[in-house]
Amino acid sequence: MESASAHFQAKTRWHWLEVVFWLCTLLPFVVTPNYLSLASQIAITALFALSLDLILGYAGIVSLGHAAFFGVGAYAAGLLAKHYWSEPLTGLVVAALIAGLVGYATSHIVVRFRHLALIMLTMGLGLLLHEAANSASALTGGADGLQGFRVPSVLGFKFDMFGRAAYGYSLIVLFLCFLVARRIIHSPFGLALRGIRENATRMPAIGAPSRAHLRKAYTIAAVMAGIAGALLTHTTSTVSLEVLSFGRSADVLVILILGGAGRLYGGIIGAIIYMVARDQFSGANPQYWYFWIGLLLVVVVMFLPNGILGGARALYKKPQ
Amino acid sequence: MLSSLAGVLFDGFAYGMLLFLLSVGLSVTLGMMNFVNLAHCSFAMVGGYATLTLMTRFGWPFLATLPMAFLAGAVISIVLERTLYRRLYRASDLDQCLFTIGIVFISVAVFAWFYTTEQQSVRVPDWLQGAQHVGGMTLANYRVFLIVVGLAITALLVFLVENTRFGARVRAAVDNQRMARGLGIDVDRAFMLTFALGGGLAGLGGALAIQVVGLDPTFALAYLVYVLIVVAVGGLGSIGGSFAAAVVLGISDMAGKYYFPWLGAFLIYLVMVGLLMWRPQGLFGKR
Amino acid sequence: MAPALSTRNLNKSFGSLTVAQDIALELPQGVRYALIGPNGAGKTTLMNLLTGMLRPDAGQVFLSGEDVTALKPDARVKRGLARTFQINTLFPQLSAIESVALAVLEREGQAHNWWRGLPRFGAAIDEAHAILGSLKVPPTRLTRELPYGQQRLVEIALALATQPKVLLLDEPAAGVPKDESTSLFDAIANLSRSLTILFIEHDMDVVFRFAARIIVMVGGRILVEGAPADIARDERVREVYLGKAHA
């Protein structure tokens, strides 16, 4: 029987597979240099999914409106670049702050609800923001999106059609945010979030201020989603209204569940699989894509309740 | 001024009837079994395409296709329930959401394959086109038709629920499933019949909706949002709640489009968020 | 000295169903009370009212003389009131020591810390380890993999980790098979004497073994309160349990 502190230490150690994984993320530079734009899209989506994992996988908040923060970050970065200056790193900070503020404000509403009301509320807030952006076309460009600005480079690396700067930038930001997420999960706060997910009734009975914890988690998740949105703006130099859409909220939920929620890497794995598959399959006929994704969802829920990572773990039973 | 207000109310009420038909089944089955069936609007889509096929391929008259649309929705509901859904009654909310969204995606793809993604329309009989002019207002015939059908079905449902044994069993099962089983009520059978009824109504709604909003494979997703709003605002398991919420939402949507067109759908979402914050269990929900 | 836990005129109804009527309690520090009564008497409801999970229609709850009626459950825990649940309300996928450590961290106000890793909180981990050790529960297994009796002990461990002054136990031995109940009762017997304990129990042997005083509840009201021997002789209590013919 392991000692108590060893029990906790074991969970925080880096597994060799993790190191291998992150080293492999450098491969696209060498092996698939024509697909670096796709790779940067995947990295951005992975970050977005990771941010959802914090509230869904770890705290248990089912949100159908997480794209709101992604979109806020994207528009914040775009508006900053269009009207003030186009240096991306400071743009990231501004976008993160604004998304965090919106997240903090809405968290006061969201944490008071559960079950269907919560799902509907998050969806409703997302839809509201989408409509607001659609209507405020003088500011946001409405349905045409925000155009007419360019983010030329980051730290001197030009954003070009080869996508090297885009992928490098997205990957580094993803990794840094991942490190933060990893720290959170292995901290007392992360344990509290898991407690809320495991049994929300028990938490107040051990003196835990559940709502305060949830507001904090929601805000952190909003910041991370906002950063992902800003990355998209910087690497593509456009903002489309779609970044706030219900479809994007639904997509990221599907991606996270595919990979496996509450497992830190689920969002990243799900993003890789989903986006590569979509790139391969939806070219000719978008209908085919819907069919296969639908089938995959049905199969995952019936047979792989913990997503792909959960299935992999079950196959490869590791001692805890 | 007043006649335009009355016009908005009329159109909104008609739209509300349509939303009611599309949503009532989901509300009751959610309240009964707590099963989140997001594929509910796929049943509506099936009904719509049934009507389309019968009219364009087989030359059936519009009114005759309506019972078939109902039947199509009901049959597809039963098939899905018996084969797949019953395994997921104990699954988490999230799992049920995801599973039924998968079904929606599949249905969208299947219908796109067979019917293409084009907007479809049907020719309703002449007496349903055009409008009546009453006291300065223009009342579209089809909208009157929708209101009549909607109210008739509501009356039928209320009668069914309040005055029949089947209705009593449904009410018991919605109120307290375990107790109902303990009393010897075959809850599974009652649920299956309710599910079929709800799916059939959705199919009927889908058929009736063609004239108002058109039909294409994305219907299953596009109207899901509205249906969910009606269900959440009205309260789970409540016919009266669905009715009230559908009417409120129908009128709000029309009023929004008429008086504040620059707001777009903003108004409905605002109404929903506000109502849910005030009463998270819905207007007529329990707890 | 103010009683550890007291209530005044506590009332609660659900529509026409009265579940608590004029409940007045005064529990001094360090005394062990058993709360007994037929099913539906309102015992668990009373616990929910005391902990704040239910809001009363009227009346007040005091902890060490302080009026806590307006406080939420987690605030009352911080003031020394802890409870266990009749049905295990645990964290299935957390290990026993993670669960108890969480309770300790919350108590110490350290659970908001998202930057430092858990292994650095050695004091909390050691304390959790000690609590589980005193209850003889293996610390590193997942809660859902523990046998039922040990899960009941984790219930108590979670409550103890909050360092309560008043402990409410809702049927601590409910559902525990006979062969596992010995360690459970040993654990209860070994609880600190400075704790005020109120436990709901149906098994009279357990009641007479552990309780210094007994409170009898019927139909939402407190029928009588007294020493075990007096309660055993009380005619009204016999009536409640055995019917009028036998009184």
Image (spheres, coloured by chain):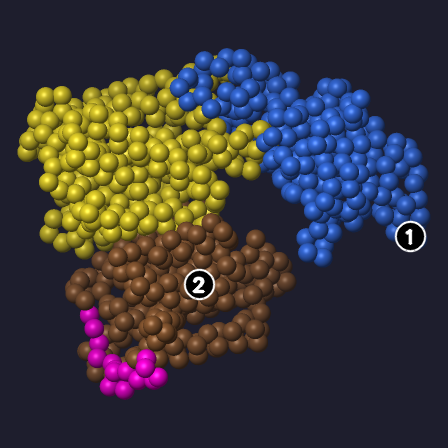
Chain colours: A yellow, B brown, C blue
Q: Would you name the residue on which mark 1 appears?
A: C244
The reply to whether the magenta stretch includes residue B279 is no
* Chain of the residue where label 1 is placed in the rendered structure: C
Horizontal side, residue C62 vs residue A103: left or right: right
Q: Amino acid at mark 1?
A: Lys
Circle number at residue B245: 2
Let me know if marks 2 and 1 both belong to one chain.
no
- Residue at 11% from the left image edge and 27% from the top image edge: A153
The reply to whether the magenta stretch includes residue B127 is yes
Q: Amino acid at mark 2?
A: Ala
Does C119 sit above or below residue C231?
above
Which of discs 2 and 1 lies nearer the camera? The answer is 2
Does A177 sit above or below residue C119?
below
Instruction: Give x and y (percent) for residue B71.
Output: 36, 74
- Residue at 28% from the left image edge and 82% from the top image edge: B131
Which residue is more in the foreground, A103 or C169?
Answer: A103
Q: Is residue C226 visible?
A: yes
Instruction: Give x and y (percent) for residue B221.
Output: 29, 57
